[in-house]
Image (cartoon, helix red, strand yellow):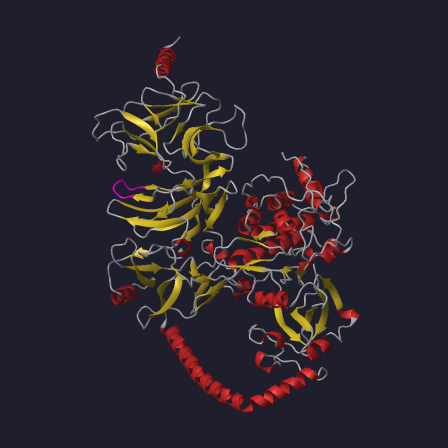
């Protein structure tokens, strides 16, 4: 044996002797480990308040005594909710792991070969070393090394896990900077839900001079709360106080950090960065025994970093990107195609020496790359910025809470966003020609206002004098159904809202005679469809515009309330994947909606037709899936309203001339207000085969109900077969159950429509199937949001979670009614049965 082998053997023996001399913990529950003890695999420390535990675990659903083992902290009664992992990048491959604390306060984690798997490098050097050190798990979830005789040292710990975040932030943790040591504490996602190693997403507070919260994917910024202004992060008003937790930003001479505290100490709250890059505040709900998303901060289209690129401003609208005033697109053609990658340029070039000025914008999320200058007044800040030819904008904010500072931007303005409920004012540099143009436009608008007020006053006076005449003429027009001309604006339409004159629909009102004429008296040859509430006819207005008229059947389940609901909803929605409403009419017993005419009609006319579906190659089908997802995302999160469709199905997906999908038929939709996420009704309205289990069985509906319907539609688009009425000789499952069976047998590709003949991307198809299976999971809280769906469909390199058992996997049911149940009151609780399909 050579010297090196001998030395290794002696060292290993010494270490082994040292470790076995430490007794393991007793079986009694304790929160403390002393230098003469080991914490071995199978033993745990439990905090004194019985909320947190420290021990070894294996990720995922593996309950065997094998696999990769990690030292971690979790909620004592929720062992699968891990909040911190010590050796996240270096697992132990057996049950030999044991943790010790050395006399000088270093934590040491060993495996079976006595190799050091993980250790801390902080020691008590430089501090008062009197008294032994112990390891303690506090009731906050903080694992600390402290002096044994000092129970409440609070900040003066030798080492603490709160200074070494993983993917989870607990109340009391500090996300930010220690200025004396120039060190930062940040969150990093897991690689996947079953792999706690370092993932690609980080969430940090940077830089300390103008702190803002940034989500990165690798080195690239994905999401940003703008710089702190003394009250909130610019663009982050969703973090104002709520009923669950209180967000806080703290700035002192020693540290700058963001933190939060639970308003009720008995409520479990955590902030996480998921492997997919979502940023979520989660709250434990004892009733459902599950975590609910209290807030997801990067869920909107405009939340994504730099969506509109240089000098572009993002809106919760369609189109989402607009150039700042005084700027125009670099490539107008690309902007018309929703490609904003080249951003915007100035209409007039700056002239540093001749008359440049500033235009005030508000309210905005402040752009990225801010530079702090000094404690200048607004006039001083403006003057100093003008002296620098490349200074493009300025404002004053209070980034550190110790007084307002002059802050400026150089070059293009990146990651701007319209923020009407909490934005900041921003002064943007403009050429003199642009400032003059803006001034002229303001003067013209002022003149127009004066003229408009004068004309309006005169008009009101005339209306008062001739009111009796107008009312008489109105009655005559309603009696005359033959020779009424079409109106081109709201003022020239007859007022046909007799049943609801107090409501302002903000839409053109078509008269009955015009509708009759355009549809050739509702000729049978012009009928293009039949919905749950009545027929739809093709028409053509005198100006040549083709329209689709939805005529409400008098014996349908949809009454005036549902009709008005559809009018009001669609009038306020603008998105390229939602059908456009042109007007409406309520006259006599008729109630009609006038839509844009889409020549390819509805998706079900193609996807379930043996010949027509040949016109849908995989590229078009995938585009349709993405378009429906984006339309739903707009309804659920990006529009001014939060809307649940409640009757999403292939017949309600219309296709324009380029086969782009548009969601239609909002008669059964519901608006959710504020933080409302779900509701219950006794009136089950929708279509079987697309309804989620919780809605069909008990009347509970939420955004997750639409997510379920979307998943079903994806299966139908991929397979070309209907969910309700699906038949396979080998089993009794419907299309959902059939897909689940194929997935478990690793034969998912067999679901694809045979007409496609392999002319598709297998990876893209499998990803769509997996996302759809996630959408139809039985429990609504396990289904993804539409923001997550769009993200998963658009990013092929993102690892997807494994789906769980779907709802309504079988079609064996006692239901003896038409599949379209619109407008009927009934209880489905005893009518639908479930067949369990075993998951992997």
Above or below, comparing residue 111 to residue 438 in the picture: above
- Residue 59, can we see it? yes
**Horizontal side, residue 591 vs residue 158: left or right:** right
- Residue 484, can we see it? no
Residue 151 pos. (x, y %) = 27, 31
Query: Which secondary structure dominates the residues rendered in magenta?
Result: loop
Specify start and end residues of the magenta stretch as a single range.
Answer: 178-183
**Horizontal side, residue 43 vs residue 463: left or right:** left
Near-viewer residue (500 or 661): 500
Q: Residue furthest bottom?
A: 465
Total tally of numbered discs in the picture: 0
**Is residue 182 shown in magenta?**
yes
**Horizontal side, residue 811 vs residue 163: left or right:** right
Q: Quadrant of residue 656?
A: bottom right
Residue 156 pos. (x, y %) = 26, 35
Residue at screen point 28% across, 53% down: 400
Residue 557 pos. (x, y %) = 69, 63
Which quadrant of the rendered structure holds the N terminus? top left
Which quadrant of the rendered structure holds the C terminus? top right
Near-viewer residue (454 or 512): 512
């Amino acid at each position: 044996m050579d010297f090196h082998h001998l030395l290794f053997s002696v060292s290993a023996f010494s270490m082994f002797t040292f470790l076995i001399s430490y007794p393991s913990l007793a079986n009694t529950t304790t929160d403390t480990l002393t230098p003469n003890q080991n914490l071995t695999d199978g033993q745990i420390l439990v905090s004194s308040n019985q909320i947190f535990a420290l021990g070894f675990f294996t990720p995922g659903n593996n309950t065997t005594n094998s696999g990769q083992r990690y030292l971690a902290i979790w909620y004592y009664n929720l062992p699968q909710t891990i909040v911190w992992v010590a050796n996240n990048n270096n697992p132990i491959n057996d049950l030999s792991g044991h943790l010790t604390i050395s006399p000088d306060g270093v934590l040491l984690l060993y495996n079976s070969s006595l190799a050091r798997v993980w250790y801390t490098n902080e020691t008590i050097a430089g501090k008062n070393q009197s008294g032994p050190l112990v390891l303690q798990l506090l009731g906050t979830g903080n694992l600390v090394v402290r002096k044994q005789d000092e129970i409440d040292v609070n900040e003066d710990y030798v080492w603490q896990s709160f200074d070494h975040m993983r993917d989870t932030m607990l109340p009391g943790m500090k996300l930010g900077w220690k200025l004396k040591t120039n060190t930062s504490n940040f969150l990093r996602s897991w690689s996947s839900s079953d792999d706690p190693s370092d993932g690609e997403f980080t969430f940090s507070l940077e830089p300390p001079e103008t702190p803002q919260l940034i989500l990165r994917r690798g080195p690239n910024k994905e999401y940003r709360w703008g710089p702190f202004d003394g009250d909130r992060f610019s663009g982050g008003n969703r973090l104002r106080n709520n009923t669950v937790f209180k967000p806080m930003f703290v700035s002192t001479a020693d540290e700058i950090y963001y933190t939060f505290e639970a308003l009720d100490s008995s409520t479990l709250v955590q902030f996480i960065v998921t492997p997919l890059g979502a940023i979520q505040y989660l709250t434990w709900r004892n009733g459902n025994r599950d975590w609910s998303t209290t807030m997801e901060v990067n869920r909107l289209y405009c939340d994504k970093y730099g969506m509109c690129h240089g000098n572009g401003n993002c809106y919760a609208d369609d189109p989402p990107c607009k150039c700042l005033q005084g700027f125009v697109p670099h490539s107008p053609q690309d902007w018309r195609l929703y490609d904003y990658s080249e951003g915007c340029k100035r209409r007039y070039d700056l002239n540093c020496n001749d008359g440049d000025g500033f235009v005030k914008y508000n309210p905005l999320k402040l752009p990225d790359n801010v530079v702090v200058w000094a404690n200048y007044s607004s006039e001083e800040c403006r003057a100093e910025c003008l002296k620098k030819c490349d200074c493009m904008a300025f404002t004053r904010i209070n980034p550190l809470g110790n007084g307002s500072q002059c802050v400026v931007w150089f070059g293009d303005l990146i990651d701007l966003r319209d923020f009407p409920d909490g934005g900041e004012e921003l002064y943007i540099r403009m050429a003199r020609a642009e400032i003059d143009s803006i001034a002229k436009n303001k003067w013209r608008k002022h003149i127009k206002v004066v003229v408009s007020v004068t004309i309006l006053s005169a008009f009101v006076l005339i209306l008062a004098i001739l009111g009796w005449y107008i009312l008489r003429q109105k009655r005559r027009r309603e009696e005359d159904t033959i020779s009424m001309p079409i109106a081109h604006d709201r003022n020239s339409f007859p007022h046909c809202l007799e049943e609801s004159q107090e409501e302002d629909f903000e839409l053109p009102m078509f008269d009955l005679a015009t509708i009759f004429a355009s549809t050739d008296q509702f000729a049978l040859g012009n009928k293009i469809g039949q919905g749950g509430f009545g027929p739809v006819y093709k028409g053509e207005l005198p100006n040549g515009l083709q329209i689709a008229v939805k005529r409400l059947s008098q014996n349908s389940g949809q009454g005036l309330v549902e009709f008005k609901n559809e009018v009001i909803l669609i009038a306020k929605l603008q998105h390229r994947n939602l059908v456009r409403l042109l007007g409406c009419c309520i006259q006599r017993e008729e109630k009609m909606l006038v839509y844009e005419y889409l020549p390819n009609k509805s998706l079900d006319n193609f996807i379930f037709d043996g010949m027509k579906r040949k016109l849908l190659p995989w590229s078009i089908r995938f585009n349709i899936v993405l378009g429906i997802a984006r339309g739903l995302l707009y309804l659920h999160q990006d529009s001014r309203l939060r809307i649940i469709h409640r009757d999403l199905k292939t017949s309600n997906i219309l296709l324009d001339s380029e086969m782009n999908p548009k969601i239609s038929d909002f008669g059964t939709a519901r608006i959710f207000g504020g933080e409302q996420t779900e509701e219950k009704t006794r009136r089950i309205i929708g279509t079987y085969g697309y309804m989620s289990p919780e809605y069909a069985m008990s009347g509970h509906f939420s955004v997750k109900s639409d997510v379920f319907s979307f998943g079903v539609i994806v299966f139908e688009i991929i397979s070309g077969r209907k969910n309700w009425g699906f038949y396979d000789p080998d089993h009794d499952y419907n299309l959902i159950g059939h897909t689940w069976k194929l997935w478990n047998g690793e034969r998912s590709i067999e679901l694809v429509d045979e007409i496609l003949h392999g002319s598709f991307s297998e990876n893209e198809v499998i990803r769509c199937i997996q996302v759809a299976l996630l959408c139809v999971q039985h429990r609504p809280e396990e289904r993804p949001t539409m923001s997550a769906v769009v993200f998963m469909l658009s990013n092929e390199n993102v690892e997807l979670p494994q789906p769980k058992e779907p709802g309504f996997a079988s079609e064996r049911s006692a239901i003896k009614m038409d599949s379209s149940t619109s407008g009927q009151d009934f209880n489905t609780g005893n009518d639908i049965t479930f067949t369990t399909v075993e998951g992997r």
